[in-house]
């Protein structure tokens, strides 16, 4: 990327440059907090470099009733409130007025937290070094309030880290933070965007995707998030061996307490239970109270033969065997089962669903090849959702043709701006949310109706 007179290519580049200044914190008890929305892509790079958990720090200003632009304090999660008694006194704000403003802002704060983090608890800050990250500082009011809120939530040490901020403001912010780190500190700063070649707005979807991706990476590395260390892992979270006759397949089972259903992941050709995209979607489903089972469809010996990777009938038979195994387990007997298929895995799922008494309650295909199920499509009875990227034109055409052949309740969702692998910012989150809504509706409906699969 050609930067010209600008220092940062984009927020990713800014985050990597900032991370180099913070590397001395690696290995310490650190949590990285991004200020939404633009600070989160920067914070993601910092958290990845420090191998630290990533979360958002949501702060709401308490404005004087008749002059809302004038801040009389700020609030954060965990009931934190930081007030400026001088402003309250000079503005003549009563206790009732303060309470009314706070109640309104707390509702907004709670909504933002649910939107960005889902049901996942906020990271515990007590006794930890907290690195607060934004994409730049212009006036310092938000950064100052963020430091105060983090301190009130129990942070032992606060490091405020940004790619760019005016030099004179950095010194003033040292009164709020224990340390302030900045890649560039110009004497004058007219706007933050002038320092970036690409400074496009960050969406809520991008923030959600980065938070989940960071959580998936830490879980994959065997490092539970702080919230899981405090509250314990979900009902079950373990590697399992799936024995079906002479076969022994490896999988990873996650069951939240009181799971309302179990989703089996049928990965596409060349993928496995370690697929980061499937792990991402699985975590979204877990947060919605659904269990997930990611497993390898083939043994290592079978996978060595590329012909097996595209043997739809073999993969469909394997999926049916694993579903039967899951339903026979003590933890799975009362759970309705759904299948999530990607690419060729979706073809295998629909092939298996065309069998009488398949026992599957709902199916979701992401970037799938339903055409590979061929003549089986009209026999599928389970509610089926097809999710395709708008830019995945060939696969989109195949899915439209398949949708016309399906006789079951179903829908086709086209995700704007997405290609086959849903690698564009926010697109995988959109696909995961559609899958969450579909499984939550159809799997819980089966349980509530008292008809778990036979």
Image (cartoon, helix red, strand yellow):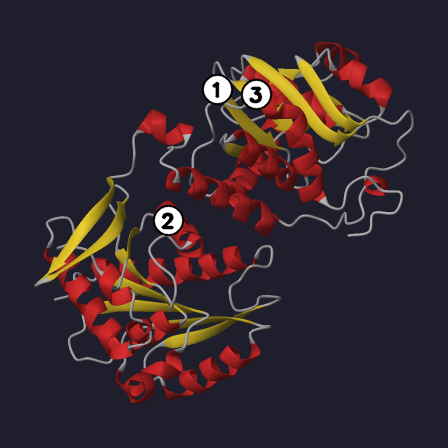
For label 3, the SS is: helix
Q: Which mark is residue 103?
A: none
Q: Which residue does the numbered mark 2 point to in the structure image? A: 288
Give coordinates of residue 144: x percent, y percent: 71, 21
| Above-or-below relation of 331 to 227 | below
Confirm whether residue 41 shows in the render: yes
Q: Residue 29: give its label.
A: 1
Q: Is residue 88 above or below residue 13?
A: above
Q: How many marks?
A: 3
Mark 2 and mark 1: span between their CA atoms? 29 Å
Which residue is denoted by mark 3 in the rendering?
25
Residue at image location 72% in from the left, 49% down from the top:
201
Front residue of 69/1: it is: 1
Q: Is residue 59 above or below residue 355?
A: above
Q: Nearer the viewer, residue 2 or 94?
A: 2
The reply, left or right, for residue 413 in relation to residue 245 is: right
**In this rendering, the label closer to the viewer, 1 or 3:** 3
Q: Nearer the viewer, residue 117 or 48?
A: 48
**Residue 397 placement (x, y as % from top left):** 51, 83
Q: Nearer the viewer, mark 2 or mark 1?
A: 1
In the rendered image, is residue 91 in sight? no
Q: Nearer the viewer, mark 2 or mark 3?
A: 3
Instruction: Give above or below for 194 relative to 419.
Output: above
Quarter-of-image position of residue 94: top right
Q: Residue furthest left?
A: 245
Distance Cα–Cα, label 1 vs label 3 = 8 Å
């Amino acid at each position: 990327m050609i930067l010209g007179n600008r220092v940062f290519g984009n927020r990713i580049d800014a985050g990597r440059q900032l991370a180099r200044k913070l590397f001395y914190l690696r290995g310490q008890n650190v949590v990285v907090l991004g200020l939404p929305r633009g600070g989160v892509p920067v914070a993601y790079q910092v958290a990845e470099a420090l191998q630290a958990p990533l979360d958002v720090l949501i702060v709401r200003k308490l404005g004087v009733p008749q002059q809302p632009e004038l801040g009389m304090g700020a609030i954060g999660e965990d009931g934190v409130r930081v007030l400026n008694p001088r402003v309250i006194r000079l503005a003549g704000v009563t206790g009732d007025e303060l309470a009314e403003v706070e109640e309104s802002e707390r509702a907004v704060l709670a909504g933002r937290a649910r939107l960005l983090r889902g049901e996942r608890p906020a990271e515990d800050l007590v006794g930890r070094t907290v690195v607060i990250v934004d994409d730049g500082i212009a006036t310092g009011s938000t950064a100052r309030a963020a430091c105060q809120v983090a301190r009130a939530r129990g942070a032992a040490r606060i490091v405020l880290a940004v790619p760019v901020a005016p030099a004179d403001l950095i010194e003033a912010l040292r009164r709020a933070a224990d340390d302030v780190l900045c890649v560039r500190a110009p004497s004058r700063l007219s706007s933050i965007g002038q320092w970036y070649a690409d400074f496009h707005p960050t969406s809520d979807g991008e923030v959600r995707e980065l938070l989940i991706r960071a959580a998936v990476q830490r879980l994959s590395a065997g490092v539970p998030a702080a919230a899981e260390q405090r509250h314990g892992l979900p009902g079950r979270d373990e590697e399992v061996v799936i024995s079906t006759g002479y076969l022994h397949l490896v999988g990873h089972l996650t069951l939240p307490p009181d799971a309302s259903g179990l989703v089996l992941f049928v990965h596409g050709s060349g993928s496995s239970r370690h697929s980061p995209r499937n792990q991402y979607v699985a975590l979204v489903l877990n947060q919605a109270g659904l269990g997930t089972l990611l497993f390898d469809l083939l043994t290592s010996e079978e996978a060595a033969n590329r012909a097996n990777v595209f043997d739809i009938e073999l993969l469909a038979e394997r999926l049916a065997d694993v579903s039967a195994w899951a339903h026979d387990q003590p933890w799975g007997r009362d759970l309705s089962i759904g299948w999530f298929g990607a690419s060729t895995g979706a073809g295998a799922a629909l092939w298996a669903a065309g069998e009488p008494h398949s026992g599957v309650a709902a199916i979701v295909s992401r970037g799938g090849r339903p055409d590979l199920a061929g003549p089986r499509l009209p026999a599928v009875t389970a509610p089926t959702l097809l999710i395709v990227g708008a830019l995945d034109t060939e696969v989109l055409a195949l899915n439209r043709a398949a949708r016309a052949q399906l006789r079951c309740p179903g829908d086709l969702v086209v995700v704007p701006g997405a290609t086959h692998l849903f690698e564009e910012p926010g697109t995988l989150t959109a696909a995961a949310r559609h899958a969450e809504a579909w499984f939550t509706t159809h799997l819980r409906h089966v349980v509530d109706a008292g008809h778990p699969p036979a």
